[in-house]
C-alpha cells in the first residue's frame, strides 16, 4: 500500500487530534491494566506506560542509542587525550575527567582507533574499528537531527493504527536510515586510512595538516553553497510529505524508505563530516558543534545557516593554507 494509509487523506491536518483521541481511547480501554499498575512504584508505573506506547518506546530506544554512542566516543576521547601531548581543543579538560574502567574488548577497540599510524595493527581489524568509530559518530551527531522524521512516522503510524490499518514498526525505518550511515562509515574509514597513509600524519586521529586538512575544509565549505546541498536539505526538512507519499505496510518498503531518507541526510551532511579530518576525528567538541549545527539547520528555513557555515569553512581553509605554506 503506497501513497499513504487508505482513508487518511482527509485527516492530514488532524493527526495531532486523532493521536490525542486515540491515546484517550487507548487509555480507557486499558483502564483495567492501569489499575493493575497501581501496586508498582513510580518508576515501575513510568516503565509500564512507556512499554504501552510504541512511540515512547521508539524514542527511548533512540535516546539510549545516542547516549551510548556519546559515552563511547567520550571515553575514547579521554583515552586519546591521555596518550598525546596537550594541544587539541579541550585536551586539558578531558585529562581531568575520570577514566572509567571498561571491558577489555572496548580497550582493544580504542587502541585500534588510536593507533599511532595507519596499519600499525592488522589492516582488517583496524579498518573494522574505524568503521565502528565513524558509525558511532554518525549515531551521535546525525541521528538526533532525524528525530522529526522518526516522530512524524510514529504520528502517521499511530493514526493508521487507530483506523485499524497494518503498520510497520518505526524501528524498521530507523534501521534503514542507519544502514545508509553504516555504508557511509565504511567510506569515511577507507578515506581516513588513505589520508593518513599518504599525508604523513603521525597519529590516526590527529588533525590532518597542510594540504590534506585545507582540502577537507575547502570541499566542506564549497559544498555548503551547492544546489545539491540545498536539495538534500529540503528533503530532510520536509519528512511528512515524503513519508505520506511513500507509505507502505510492507517492512521492506519502509526499510527502503529509511535508506532513502538516510541518503538525503548523507547528501546534506557528508561534507561537514570532512571537517573532522581537519580538527581530529576524536575531537568531541567539534563533534558536538557539528551535531548541533545539523540539528539547527534542518529545523530552520532558508540558506543563511548553510552559507554562514560555508563562509567560515572557506576562510578557515585559506588560513590553514597560509599557515602551512
Image (cartoon, grey):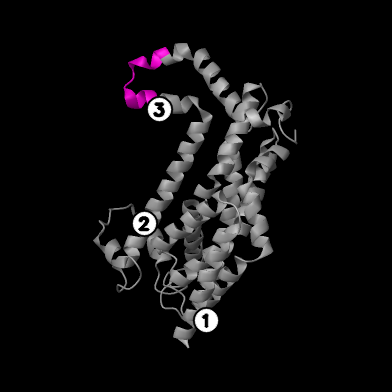
Q: Which residue is mark 1?
A: 211
**Depth order, front residue of 303/180:** 303
Residue 299: image x %, image y %? Answer: 55, 49
Please report the bounds of the magenta region as a residue range. 35-47
Q: Is residue 39 magenta?
A: yes
Q: Which residue is mark 3?
A: 47
Label 2 to label 3: alpha-carbon separation: 28 Å
Q: Secondary structure at mark 1?
A: helix
**Depth order, front residue of 190/14:** 14
Q: Which residue is situated farthest in the bottom direction here?
A: 325
CB under 8 Å between callouts 3 and 1?
no
Q: Residue at x 52, y 55 (%)?
A: 294
Decide which of tag 2 and tag 1 comes sooner along the chain.
2
Q: Residue at x 45, y 14 (%)?
A: 33
**Depth order, front residue of 108/293:** 293
Q: Residue at x 45, y 28 (%)?
A: 50
Decide which of tag 2 and tag 3 comes sooner along the chain.
3
Q: Is residue 20 above or below residue 98?
A: above
Decide which of tag 3 and tag 1 comes sooner along the chain.
3
Amino acid at each position: 500500500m503506497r501513497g499513504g494509509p487508505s482513508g487518511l487523506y482527509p485527516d492530514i491536518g488532524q493527526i495531532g487530534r486523532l493521536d490525542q483521541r486515540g491515546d484517550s481511547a487507548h487509555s480507557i480501554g486499558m483502564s483495567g491494566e492501569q489499575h493493575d499498575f497501581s501496586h508498582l512504584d513510580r518508576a515501575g508505573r513510568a516503565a509500564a506506560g512507556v512499554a504501552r506506547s510504541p512511540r515512547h518506546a521508539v524514542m527511548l530506544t533512540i535516546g539510549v542509542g545516542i547516549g551510548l554512542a556519546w559515552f563511547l566516543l567520550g571515553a575514547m576521547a579521554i583515552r586519546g587525550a591521555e596518550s598525546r601531548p596537550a594541544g587539541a581543543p579541550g585536551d586539558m579538560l578531558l585529562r581531568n575527567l575520570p577514566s572509567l574502567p571498561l571491558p577489555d574488548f572496548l580497550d582493544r577497540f580504542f587502541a585500534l582507533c588510536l593507533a599511532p599510524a595507519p596499519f600499525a595493527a592488522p589492516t582488517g581489524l583496524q579498518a573494522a574499528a574505524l568503521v565502528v568509530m565513524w558509525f558511532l559518530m554518525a549515531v551521535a551527531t546525525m541521528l538526533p537531527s532525524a528525530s522529526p522524521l522518526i516522530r512524524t512516522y510514529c504520528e502517521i503510524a499511530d493514526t493508521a493504527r487507530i483506523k485499524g490499518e497494518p503498520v510497520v514498526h518505526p524501528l524498521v525505518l530507523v534501521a534503514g536510515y542507519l544502514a545508509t550511515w553504516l555504508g557511509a562509515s565504511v567510506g569515511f574509514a577507507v578515506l581516513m586510512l588513505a589520508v593518513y597513509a599518504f599525508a604523513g600524519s603521525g597519529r590516526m586521529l590527529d588533525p590532518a595538516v597542510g594540504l590534506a586538512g585545507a582540502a577537507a575544509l575547502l570541499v566542506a565549505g564549497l559544498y555548503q553553497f551547492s544546489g545539491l546541498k540545498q536539495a538534500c536539505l529540503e528533503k530532510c526538512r520536509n519528512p511528512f510529505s515524503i513519508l505520506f507519499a511513500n507509505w507502505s505496510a510492507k517492512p521492506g518498503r519502509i526499510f527502503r524508505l529509511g535508506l532513502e531518507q538516510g541518503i538525503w541526510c548523507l547528501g546534506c551532511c557528508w561534507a561537514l563530516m570532512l571537517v573532522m579530518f581537519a580538527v581530529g576525528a576524536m575531537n568531541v567538541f567539534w563533534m558536538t558543534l557539528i551535531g548541533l549545527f545539523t540539528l539547527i539547520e534542518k529545523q530552520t528555513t532558508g540558506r543563511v545557516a548553510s552559507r554562514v557555515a560555508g563562509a567560515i569553512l572557506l576562510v578557515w581553509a585559506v588560513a590553514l593554507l597560509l599557515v602551512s605554506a
